[in-house]
Image (cartoon, helix red, strand yellow):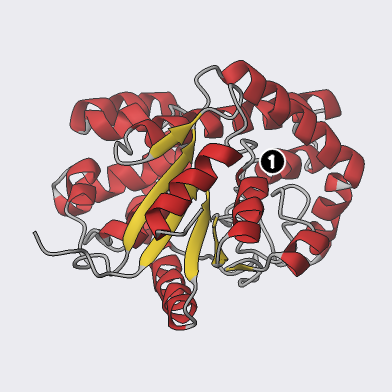
Amino acid sequence: MSPDIRPPAIFLMGPTASGKTALACELAERFPLELVSVDSALVYRGLDIGAAKPDAATLASHPHALIDIRDPATPYSAAEFRDDALAAMQSITAQGRVPLLVGGTGLYFRALQRGLSDLPEADPALRARLTEEGARIGWPALHARLAQLDPPAAARIGPNDAQRLQRALEVIELSGRPLSELQRGGRGGAFPWRVLKLALLPADRRPLHARIAERFDAMLAAGFLDELRALRRRGDLHADLPAIRAVGYRQGWEYLDGATDAAGFRERAIFATRQLAKRQITWLRAELDARSFDPDVAPPLPRAVEAVRLFLGTPV
């Protein structure tokens, strides 16, 4: 078998609040790594506190590519991420360094390494009809329909996740094929890097849930609601934009609209973040080629350092 001469790259994955950024920065202190963010909220300028964006001091000492690259009024797609990430990785490799991609957006990692499926374009009329139907009979009823037409997609989409339910049903009507089937047919050719995958994967979600609640309270204390009010004052943002649909921002927008009280806002935002973490963990468990570390059993740094050292062939 001929040796794999592709340049190296590292994926550092994990659910929200699992300590990915801190570990990435520690690894960058020890190896010739450059960081690339893989996060669908961190791409947006102005989504700072609620998105748990690394602070200015962290970004000054450890710059991350693909943070703050898009105005929140303009949606950012997985296809755009793939193009931007490949360009960043090529630049890092050309400098003789190794790209370390860190984040929790599984769709972005999947699109980057496996390519994108040939999914049909959105149909405004069909989307409007599904929106009206969801409002009339309830999104759980549409989820039940999806479970009959595309069980794998229904298994990973929540019964009240209107955006993803709408898209899955839209794809079926437009293509006549299940979304899960189309997504398996990714395109893009062989990935031009050999990849070490590291995953922070807690076996017991209770400590993670506690950190999520603590972090959200810290966000509130740091001025998350003021950040939301500043976004609303712009006048060009609305609840249907992907940036505002981000976990925490959606619930905060509804709170400022008067749809819930402060306690309800906190409860719903924490619950939504826990559900996000659950989906991320489910996705990570399917990444069978990843080296997994439970951050709540033992500090992951020593094992991650050894894995990177062996992968890069760095002397002790």
x and y percent of residue 299 in the render? 62, 31
Depth check, front residue: 249 or 206: 206
Residue at coordinates 43% horizontally, 27% vertically from top-left?
Answer: 159
Amino acid, disc 1: Gly
- The part of the image, by quadrant, that contains residue 46 is bottom right
Residue furthest left in the image = 1
Depth check, front residue: 49 or 101: 101
x and y percent of residue 266 in the render? 77, 29
x and y percent of residue 28 in the render? 61, 60
Residue bearing mark 1: 248
Q: Secondary structure at mark 1?
A: loop
x and y percent of residue 133 in the render? 40, 37
Q: Is residue 13 visible?
A: no
State whether residue 226 is above or below residue 161.
Answer: below
- The part of the image, by quadrant, that contains residue 256 is top right
Residue at coordinates 44% horizontally, 45% vertically from top-left?
Answer: 307
- Quadrant of the image containing the N terminus: bottom left
Q: Is residue 44 visible?
A: yes
State whether residue 98 is above or below residue 124.
Answer: below
State whether residue 73 is above or below residue 154.
Answer: below
Residue at coordinates 24% horizontally, 49% vertically from top-left?
Answer: 183
Q: Is residue 257 left or right of residue 192?
A: right
Q: Is residue 67 left or right of residue 309?
A: right
Depth check, front residue: 245 or 173: 245
Depth check, front residue: 110 or 102: 102
Q: Would you call the spot at circle 1 few (<14 residues within 10 Å), some (14-19), or many (20 or more)?
A: many
Residue at coordinates 63% horizontally, 25% vertically from top-left?
Answer: 208
